[in-house]
Image (cartoon, rainbow, N blue to C red):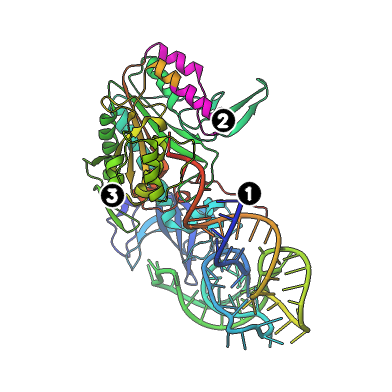
Amino acid sequence: MIGENEAIEPEAVAEGSVTVAGRVMRFRGQGKLIFAELRDGSGNIQLFVEQSTADDFDSFKLLNLGDWIGASGMPMRTKRGELSVKVRAWSLLAPAHRSFGDKWKGISDPEVRYRQREVDLWANRDVRQIFLQRSTIIKYIREFLDENGFVEVETPILQAVEGGAAAKPFITHHNALHADLSLRIALELYLKRALVGGFGRVYELGRVFRNEGLSPRHNPEFTMLELYQAYADYTDMMDMVEQLVSGACLRLHGKTVISYQGQEIDLSPPWRRATMEELIFEATSETVNLAMTREEVAGVADRLKVAYAKDDGSGKIIQEIYEKTTEPNLMGPVHVYDYPKEVSPLARDHRSKQNYVERFETVVAKKELANAFSELNDPVEQRARLEAQAALRAAGDEEAMAVDEDFLRALEHGMPPTGGLGVGIDRLVMLLTDQPNIKEVILFPALRKDERQ
RNA sequence: GCGCCUCUAGCUCAAUUGGCAGAGCAACGGACUCUUAAUCCGCAGGUUCGGGGUUCAAGUCCCCGGAGGCGCACCA
């Protein structure tokens, strides 16, 4: 309707008839003439309703803001130049029994905004935009991966043994099987089995669940992209992150420089690549590495007032130092690479550095956006690492992994050398839409049950 | 889980040192044939998040509970 009738001159009425529908968002009554603003997913259109030419004018005056109506009539342009529909026939499609808040200020109460997102979407126009942008980003990712030969697959959400990440799972129960099952905390293990099965490039874009606290950056269920590429390594995954993120940004904004919470960030590839230890040194002027004894590393942590557990090895302590002193100030984008083996049970041994693995995390605006490695494909080594994890688990570490025999058997059949990548989609959307709170990019975020009377 | 802050009409907000709970928008009634947050007149609207306490008097002060925001913890 809007596109086809751009040429109409002010005060002119075009030939033919159009039919429009939507929710009434505004009335501007003029006695025997009413202007009404109709809105739907595609935009706004003004209705021009005259007593002399519209059906049932008296009933039209009784409509409420929020009512859904359909109307037909002739396209026209008003004296002030606004494209409108000169209504002849109209009908009430569905009444609204509740209002959408102040017509100018909308609704700002986060209780209503998050619990009743349907109201938020009408009351606050910008909110709709965020979710359209989220859709655009996800579409771009699928398009990019599909064009690059990746196959999208779906793997189980209900799992007997959850794995692929260090996190507490949600537990549920299968009645017929008389079995407790976990909701997945990562996509990793099944996707690797798909690689063993011969899919050279696979990805899954899906929900994972972690039984952890809520925060402006954490929702208990969130969307993760994981992809695996045979014959690739972690440096290839760095390229992949850069292409995915800068490409999505370009699609969304037409440029690769963004402003995030007042900070300008240039996402044009290539991005900086630095080892975790280089970045720790830049942030603290302290040197740490795995050639040092545990006592020396612990001494550095003490000087920096970073807490660690008495069972933590040097690798874990180094990671703690990084997370407490370095990451919180990293604007990035930067790929932080070469992690201690101790904290990375699924990543392949570093090709030249002992006790390190080929792993990186991408940090942008102080947040982890991606986590990737050259995947461990040696079944003997993998079994040893998982058994070490299982020992931690038995000792009370709820986030340590369990031994997944099905996964290990799969590796014994042989998995090609592979680069793997995980991207937190919600955080990517936050970054690209300049939102500080993850609840703003999740349509229905997790909230406590409302116990109020 | 811990700390700080917030919660008043359908919505957005006000209410001095503790002193009659108010406005704009929406709704409702009316005027108006080119409006753009239309305008104008009128009318109505309250468990001040819930419960308890102090006081002659509590939206305001104290205690308990609920929800939310932020921070911490947790989150490789």
Q: A114 or A185, which is in the foreground?
A: A185
Q: Nearer the viewer, mark 2 or mark 1?
A: 2
Pick whichever, A158 or A329, lies toward us. A329
Q: Name the residue under label 3.
A: A285
Q: Residue B1: horizontal and vertical position, in percent?
A: 61, 51
Residue at the image position 49 percent from the left and 63 percent from the top: A106
Q: Give the structural element (helix, strand or loop) at label 2.
A: loop
Mark closest to the chain's N terminus, 3 or 2: 3
Q: Dot 1 corresponds to which residue?
A: A449
Identify which amino acid the numbered label 2 is placed on. Ala
Query: Is residue A96 shown left or right of residue B56?
Result: left
A187 in magenta: no
Q: Residue A395 carries which label?
A: 2
Residue A382 visible to an observer of this rendering? yes
Q: Which residue lies furthest to the top in this view?
A: A413
| Mark pair 3, 2: CA separation | 35 Å
